[in-house]
Image (cartoon, coloured by chain):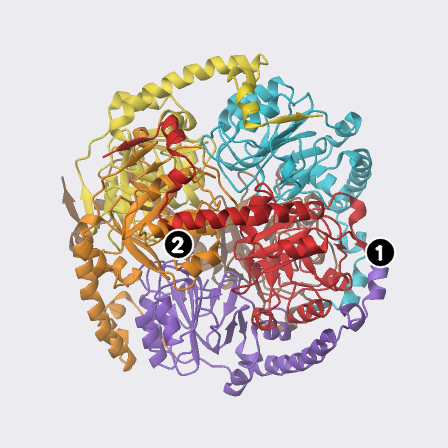
Chain colours: A cyan, B red, C purple, D orange, E brown, F yellow
Amino acid sequence: MIMSMNQLGVVKRNIVRADKAAVEKLSRFGVATVHEAMGRVGLMKPYMRPVYPGARLCGTAVTIFLQPGDNWMMHVAAEQLQPGDVAVAACTTDNFDGFFGDLLATSFQARGARGLIIDGGVRDIDELEKMRFPVFSRAIHAKGTIKATLGSVNIPVVCAGALVNPGDVVIADTDGVVVVPAAMARQVADAAERRESLEGEKRAKFAAGVLGLDLYNMREPLEKAGLRYID
Amino acid sequence: MIMSMNQLGVVKRNIVRADKAAVEKLSRFGVATVHEAMGRVGLMKPYMRPVYPGARLCGTAVTIFLQPGDNWMMHVAAEQLQPGDVAVAACTTDNFDGFFGDLLATSFQARGARGLIIDGGVRDIDELEKMRFPVFSRAIHAKGTIKATLGSVNIPVVCAGALVNPGDVVIADTDGVVVVPAAMARQVADAAERRESLEGEKRAKFAAGVLGLDLYNMREPLEKAGLRYID
Amino acid sequence: MIMSMNQLGVVKRNIVRADKAAVEKLSRFGVATVHEAMGRVGLMKPYMRPVYPGARLCGTAVTIFLQPGDNWMMHVAAEQLQPGDVAVAACTTDNFDGFFGDLLATSFQARGARGLIIDGGVRDIDELEKMRFPVFSRAIHAKGTIKATLGSVNIPVVCAGALVNPGDVVIADTDGVVVVPAAMARQVADAAERRESLEGEKRAKFAAGVLGLDLYNMREPLEKAGLRYID
Amino acid sequence: MIMSMNQLGVVKRNIVRADKAAVEKLSRFGVATVHEAMGRVGLMKPYMRPVYPGARLCGTAVTIFLQPGDNWMMHVAAEQLQPGDVAVAACTTDNFDGFFGDLLATSFQARGARGLIIDGGVRDIDELEKMRFPVFSRAIHAKGTIKATLGSVNIPVVCAGALVNPGDVVIADTDGVVVVPAAMARQVADAAERRESLEGEKRAKFAAGVLGLDLYNMREPLEKAGLRYID
Amino acid sequence: MIMSMNQLGVVKRNIVRADKAAVEKLSRFGVATVHEAMGRVGLMKPYMRPVYPGARLCGTAVTIFLQPGDNWMMHVAAEQLQPGDVAVAACTTDNFDGFFGDLLATSFQARGARGLIIDGGVRDIDELEKMRFPVFSRAIHAKGTIKATLGSVNIPVVCAGALVNPGDVVIADTDGVVVVPAAMARQVADAAERRESLEGEKRAKFAAGVLGLDLYNMREPLEKAGLRYID
Amino acid sequence: MIMSMNQLGVVKRNIVRADKAAVEKLSRFGVATVHEAMGRVGLMKPYMRPVYPGARLCGTAVTIFLQPGDNWMMHVAAEQLQPGDVAVAACTTDNFDGFFGDLLATSFQARGARGLIIDGGVRDIDELEKMRFPVFSRAIHAKGTIKATLGSVNIPVVCAGALVNPGDVVIADTDGVVVVPAAMARQVADAAERRESLEGEKRAKFAAGVLGLDLYNMREPLEKAGLRYID
């Protein structure tokens, strides 16, 4: 999804990346925590899964808009990647081809990129795991691609249902992928920190046998809502 | 998908709708033509289908951001609908419940709305067809919803993979659903008109037996690409 | 789904069908209304769709438990069908074969059956439409079946996610399929009648331009929940 | 799926079409009947559906092997179509783009083609219905395609799970799509005729109330298999 | 799926759990063996998968009936969990939100629960693996839920296509999830034991090169069925 | 998919297996490399996944054509397996039952088979992993099967969208499954070897920071295609 026909065949070179300190702070939290800290928004669809166990990443988005069966723009995007970036690739239509493999991963890693989020397929999974180059995708597929049609780099894209602007923070782990708008990175990192410290206290109480019914004072609202206990 | 945690629980009253004349002009063209005129962007996912045969619509978007199993915001949105509008509903998560039926359709129609686009389920399909209130959805499901949690009205939403801003033009027919940004409505309508007149000429030639190979001068590039004819 | 290994290879002849008057009364209401009248329970999954436009049915369930690719039990079930019954077929595993076609439909119709609900595939769709024998299925598939393995007839089955006991009322229309337990048929029919008369009043108000916000007194709870209007 | 790397970028001009009389005879039977007459083989996957109600076709296959998002080969194929042919298009990978619309349909129809079977998307559905040009596809999608990469025409293809050789007979109706190898067309047409006359007799017996249990002598084998009747 | 509108908003406190010794005996066998021992019934749909490798569980069901996007009943259910129980959660409609994470897991584990089966989404997967709290779900999704609407606890539910009554035995491993009705637990455990000892003998024979054709005396029935060997 | 009604109920004993040396050479390369070496054809659909991490195989195909819910032909096929073979199983219809488990794996392994490719379900996953018997399937499902209906062994089958002839080379790893026609095995192995040595050089250059834009001389064609860089 792009917002104007003027955005096809375009590479934007200067993008405003989220504040580095905020990105590093966000990298300490999991996707579920960040998503809650944002007000329960910003998640990609749950079909986005890590291609190997234990993959996780946090960095600033360089966005890529692909044509089906064509990974030309991946090479164009490589030049725009800076240390700390994460490539985020969307496609003009649903397509599961293997747009990305170990050669491109070597190139991206040499540029300092921290990983790839792609609403499409990837291949060379074993090599990606050996390289520890984290990728989250909707499919694994050995199908190769051509280099024939223009897409774009660093335009706003909708990837797996989430809007991603270049420079936004992208965080991914076993629970999924979440996008934090660049301008909100610091605020969300602070909210995540507060949430995590609260969770620690709650966890201790739950472990000691306290029930959520009492911890959250739910008994009265449940009764009001009409909950009946029977034997 | 919303872009900030400040956008939950919000109703924006004053939105900038696309130019009326441009909307009317766009209403003369099909979704495929408009999508081509925009440069092949702006389509929703193909799982969005009309709930009855022959449904089609064109109007300006009033956007609705729903919580799963909850249609409270539909009623909030009704008040924001003006003649010529189309309600466009997204949800914070994948959910196929029946968020909309004939009562809400009666209310929307009384407000002058031209139809509904919803990335979720609807019901009372027979009544909707009798009322000629066009709906495009991802599911038909009789499952009812509650009215308990806040979403938003008239914020930017991602609906079935397409970004929709309030006031954008939404066009839907048997081929799918396309979104035209408000600021581009006139330009796209003109491009669609040019495209359609060209198509008329081509259609006549095809009907007369001219081949695309000749009409588009493809024989030479095909040969260069290496196409071989064998017997 | 069956509850005991003693239930494979069994045909139960005497089943308690829902009260006839209640069934006839229920046949006047749509699936969405009946589902609401039951307290929003009893729906099958939304993948169950009519095989031709306008199909609808209401009757008492004769249940069939099939093996994949095998429709032997369909013939066993035919003998158990009485006028006013609806055949409801589940399968031991996900299977989309064409278990049912125009010959079996002729036999079922001759027995007085009112239609078929099947969590599998059917074929001969054009003939079924000509015969006006309503079928709701998860797939249309010409693939034929064999007659080699025992299932059961008139045991409790889970069909498309809903539990169906022999004799229960099954109602299906464009909005889906709903199951009413036999013992509740009268009570649900009465509740549906009340609901429908209330809906008539509401529809008139909506048509006159009254908003749901006012009709349901939602403005205050929305404000309490924190809804903000901005310009 | 193609069988050799030598088959990319190839157009075979002289293909052996199935016997005309056999094709005409086959056109009198439905897909389910033909599939049974072949020994229950040759069906495409059930996701292949007509794009408008009542579509049906029977003809000899001209096969097309497409690249994702690219319909160049459609134009190459047009020249190979002869009166009585059906275009059968497969793709090197799963892709739902709109490879085909009313302009190509006009060209195909002018060549005498009887329709299209495509394991991909199509668009301009309303126009296709008006033209009465039958199409069976896995998706409806307005997404346009480019003309940049070679596929092939008239090589063996696997379309929606079924192997199709150029010249084979393809029959499609509401029940799905079936492929009859050219060399077997006459034999299958005869078997279909025998089967249909038998079905007529059976239908009359079923309509008169005879049970399949008796018509097919199933009571004894059912008893031997262990079927128990309980009250 | 529940059987009556009286079952919404209900918590049943006293449930009859399957015999402890039978549960422990069942815990020694895999899902495939138990499913066979029951007569090939009782399996959940294959979309139910462990959220981390090596997860397995066996225990008595405490059932939970959830509303979409709402995990209030999880907290109500925690109080009903006893050592040896497994929480089994169904939802009134298809929903993939993350109803359950590490805090609730801590609470459930503190109550002595052995794991969770949920026809919906879960999150905090890495923490669940570290805690060794086994969960089988249809999705992994970081999407949070609210606590606003009543469901029920300890009513019969249909979870992923299988009927589960409170107190039934639930067994899950890499092969899937199976439900054993409480009253049949002992009988099924004995049948599983017999089956497993037979399997050991067969395994040794297969390893020694004996063919199933001979071990099961299949050559004659295959010949009778018409199997032909050609060269 | 089979090509003639004469091919049901048939076991072909003498099949021409691909050249041994070519098979061994092919076993050194990954699926993505082999697929590219063939000209980007021969892949199965991406839903085919290894049932345990690290599974990979390469061998000559013995094909099996199954009926839904029936694994009789698995036992017939066992006798046809020779050291170095891979069993490749297709089904007459979509079916996810567990056709294969540890007993059959023991038998296949005793015959010298190198693994199984199946367009259906399997079970006993933990045991398969312990045995290191690699299986690639579309589903994991504990559902057992019967032995009642004839399929075939060593006829051409379409498995997960790819045509497999008996004796073809099948290679599977984390990236998917690819089929190399027996007659092309040597040629493809040589092409794969050339491709892999080229990839090594490219990998070194990418690791050193060379961009694909320069390595592949893409800057000029991108400019010609109209790519614009903006700031």
Q: Is residue F116 above or below residue C131?
A: above
- Image quadrant occupied by the C terminus of chain E: top left
In this picture, residue F92 sits left or right of residue A68? left
Q: Look at the picture and state if B76 lies above or below F185.
A: below
What is the chain identity of the residue bearing mark 1? Answer: C
Q: Secondary structure at mark 1?
A: strand
Q: Secondary structure at mark 2?
A: strand
Dots 1 and 2 on the same chain: no
Q: Quadrant of residue A185?
A: top right
- A162 lies above or below C201: above
x, y percent for residue F119: 37, 44
Which mark is on residue D136? 2
Q: Look at the image and tell me whether residue B193 can be seen.
A: yes
Q: As shown in the figure, which amino acid type bears the numbered disc 2?
A: Phe
Residue D216 placement: quadrant: bottom left
Taking the spot 59% from the left edge, 28% from the top edge, the residue there is A134
- Packing grade of label 2 (10 A; few <14, some 14-19, many >=20) is many
Relative to C195, say whether F198 is above or below.
Answer: above
CA distance separating discs 1 and 2:
49 Å
Q: Nearer the viewer, residue A125 or E91?
A: A125
Which residue is most to the bottom?
C21
Q: In the picture, which quadrant includes the N terminus of chain E? A: bottom right
Label 1 crowd bin: few (<14), some (14–19), many (20+), radius 10 Å: some
What subunit carries mark 2?
D
Q: Residue at x 45, y 51 (%)?
A: D102
Residue type beneath disc 1: Tyr
Q: Which residue is mark 1?
A: C229
Q: Can residue B66 be seen at all in this image of the molecule?
A: no
Residue C10, position as x, y percentages in the image: 36, 70
State the image coordinates of residue B228 (x, y, percent, origin top left): 31, 30
Q: Nearer the viewer, mark 1 or mark 2?
A: 2
Q: Is residue A197 left or right of residue C164?
A: right
